[in-house]
């Protein structure tokens, strides 16, 4: 059983930056692909980015490509999401998730989830 705890959310003005962090415990962290999802009010949860087990590969959804960077530290059991040039449409609850699948593009492929952290971007 893997436990995931997100931190780093908050309120930021458009154009600003935030760094989200997710701490994992209770499992072999390096055995999982790690993803960040977000869910805005009234919308479905969507994949933002994921990173491979070693950290050598990553994927970004089109709306965040070039602005967000996902990274992981397998020694510390953490995965971060650096968010730059934030826009009001980035406002959402952001979730960290772990997957034993390879190329986990869909949320049904994720086995463990954090509780979420709120990110609010004001215009």
Image: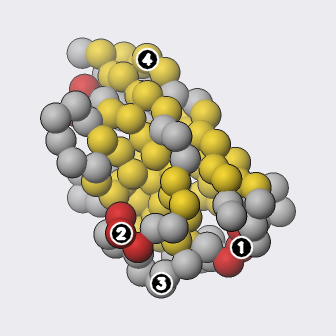
Q: In the image, which is nearer the foreground, mark 1 or mark 2?
A: 2
Whether the residues at callouts 2 and 4 have beta carbons within 8 Å, the answer is no
Can residue 10 be seen here? The reply is: yes
Q: Distance between the residues labelled 1 and 2?
A: 20 Å
- Quarter holding the N terminus is bottom right
Q: Which structural element holds mark 4?
A: strand
Query: Disc 3 marks which residue?
Result: 102
For the point 68% across and 77% down, the residue is 31
Q: Are marks 3 and 2 in contact (CB under 8 Å)?
A: no
Q: Which of marks 1 and 4 is in front?
A: 1
Q: Position of residue 107 (x, y in %)?
A: 35, 64
Q: Name the residue under label 1.
A: 30
Which residue, given by chain and number where applicable, does mark 2 sit on?
Answer: 108
Q: Can residue 66 be seen in this view?
A: no
**Quarter location, residue 76:** bottom right
**Crowd rating for badge 3 (residues with CA inside 10 Å; few <14, some 14–19, many 20+):** few
Dot placed on the residue nearer the N-terminal end, 2 or 4? 4
Q: Earlier in the sequence, mark 1 or mark 4?
A: 4
Per the rendering, the mark at residue 11 is 4
Relative to 10, 5 lies left or right:
right
């Amino acid at each position: 059983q893997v436990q995931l705890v997100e931190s780093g959310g908050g309120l930021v003005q458009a154009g600003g930056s935030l760094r989200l962090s997710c701490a994992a415990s209770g499992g072999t962290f390096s055995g999982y692909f790690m993803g960040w999802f977000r869910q805005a009010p009234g919308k479905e949860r969507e994949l933002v980015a994921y990173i491979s087990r070693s950290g050598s590969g990553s994927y970004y959804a089109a709306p965040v490509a070039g602005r967000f960077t996902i990274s992981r530290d397998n020694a510390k059991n953490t995965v971060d999401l650096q968010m730059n040039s934030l826009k009001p449409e980035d406002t959402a609850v952001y979730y960290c998730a772990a997957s034993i699948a390879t190329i986990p593009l869909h949320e049904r492929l994720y086995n463990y989830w954090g509780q979420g952290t709120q990110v609010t971007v004001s215009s």
